[in-house]
Amino acid sequence: MALKSRCPVALLLAFAYPEAAWSLDPQAINVYGFDFIPTFSMSESYDDNFRELEHDVESTMITRLAPSFELKAEDRNSATRVIWQPTRYIYHSDSDASNTAQRLRAESIMEFTDSHRLKLEAEARKYERTTSTAVDGINDKIENTRVNGVYTYGAKTAANQLDFGANYAQLRYDNADGINDDKERNTSGFNTTWYHRLGSKTRSLLEYDHTRFDYLQSDSVRSSKSDALLAGAEWDMTARTTGKLKLGYERKNFDDNASDDLSNPTWQVDLQFKPRTYSTFTFLARQALAEGDDGADAVKSTFTQVGWRHGWTERVITVAQAGMGRYEYEGQDRTDNLQDYNLAVIYKMRRWLDLELGYRYRDNDSDADADNESFTRNVFQISFDVSL
C-alpha cells in the first residue's frame, strides 16, 4: 500500500512554521573547549484537523516538548557542531497519535586556504507523520538518513568559483504489515556549479544536478535517474537586497521501459528585501519534479511563498507568510491546489525567554476521485522558548 501525499517532501521546507528562535539569544556553557548550548521549547496548540482529512475530521489539543542540545567548536579556519533534538508530541484526544521524534545532525566547515573549502553535513531522523498517511487514522513511522558534502575551489572574490557536491540518503518505513515498503529507497547524486563574477556584487551561475533513485522492491517501476541543467545569477546589491535566480530544465528517465520518461521546466527564486534593519520581505518560488505517489509516476510541484518579518520594538516581532502550491500527478487525472498561511507574534520577554502566539491555515483543493484528498485545517498555538 502506497503512502498518500499531498505535499511532496522536496518542498516541505518552504512550509516551515516561524519559530520563536528568530529572537532567542542563548548563552553557551564551556565544556572542555566546546560550546554547549541547551534550549527548551514547549508549545500548546489546538488543531481542528490534525490528520488533514475531508471527512471524519478529528480535532485535538497537542502538547509539544522539544529540548535541544547543541555542541559546537570554532577556530580560525573551521567550525563544527552537533545537534540532538528529541521531541515529544502528546495528542490529548488521540493517544495513538502521540509519538516521540528524534533528530541528530552534524555539520562541519573547513577552510584549508582562501581557494579550498569543504562543507560536510549528516543527519538522521526518526519520526511519525499524522497527515498524508497510508491508512487514515494511523501514523506513518519514518526513518530518514542523509549525508552530503560540497567542495569549493576558488576564492570568494575570484572571477570564477567551482562547487562540487555529492549526497546520499536512505528512506525507510517501520509500519505494520509492510505498509509503504514500496516507498523505501536509496537516493544518491552529485552536482556541480560554476560561478562567474560579473561585478563586485553579482555572479552568474551554471549548475548541473544528477540524482539516482533506487527503490528497494525489485519490481518497482519508480526507480529512475534525474538530470537537471540550470542557469542564473545571485546578487547582493546592497545591505537591503539579496537574491538568487535559477532557471532550467530537468528530465526523469525510468528504468522500467513501460513508464514514460518525463521532462519539465524547473526554477528556483529566492529574494530578500530589507527596507529597514528591523523589517524583511522575502519571496520564494520553486518548480520541480517530485517522486511519484498514489499511483503517479511523478508529481510536478510548483510553489510560491511571500513573507514579512517586522520588529515593531526590540521586544515585539511579527511574522506573516502566505504560500500557494500546485501539484500535478503525472499519469493521473489529478491536480491539487494548496494554500498555506502563517501568522505569529513573538514577544522577547527576556534574553533567555521568548513567547510566541501563532495561527496557521491550510486549504487543499484536490480534484482526485478518492475521498480525503481535499481538506481545510486551522492551528492555534502558544509556545515558550527557553535558554540559559
Image (cartoon, rainbow, N blue to C red):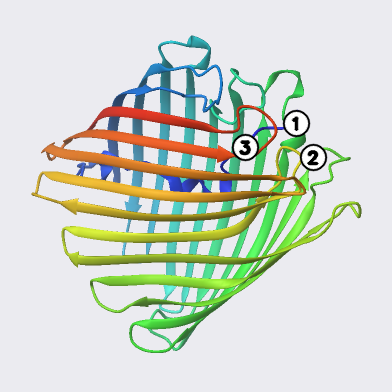
Residue plotted at (20% across, 46% down)? 318
Residue highlighted by disc 3: 5
Residue highlighted by disc 1: 181
Please tell me whether residue 229 is drawn above or below residue 190 in the rendered image: below
Q: Residues within 10 Å of mark 2 (few under 14, many from 20)?
A: some
The dot on residue 216 is 2
Q: CA distance from mark 3 to mark 1?
A: 15 Å
Q: CA distance from mark 3 to mark 2?
A: 19 Å
Mark 3 or mark 1: which comes first in sequence?
3
- Which of the 4 quarters of the picture holds residue 365? top right
Q: Residue furthest right?
A: 257
Q: CA distance from mark 2 to mark 1?
A: 8 Å
Amino acid type, mark 1: Asp
Where in the figure is residue 147, as x and y percent of width and height?
58, 50
Mark 2 or mark 1: which comes first in sequence?
1
Amino acid type, mark 3: Ser
Where in the figure is residue 246, as x and y percent of width and height?
52, 72
Would residue 47 appear left or right of 116 to someone viewing this image?
left
Mark 3 or mark 2: which comes first in sequence?
3
Q: Residues within 10 Å of mark 1 (few under 14, many from 20)?
A: many
Amino acid type, mark 2: Leu
Task: Evaluate if marks 2 and 1 touch, with contact meaning CB atoms under 8 Å apart.
Answer: yes
Residue plotted at (49% across, 19% down)? 99
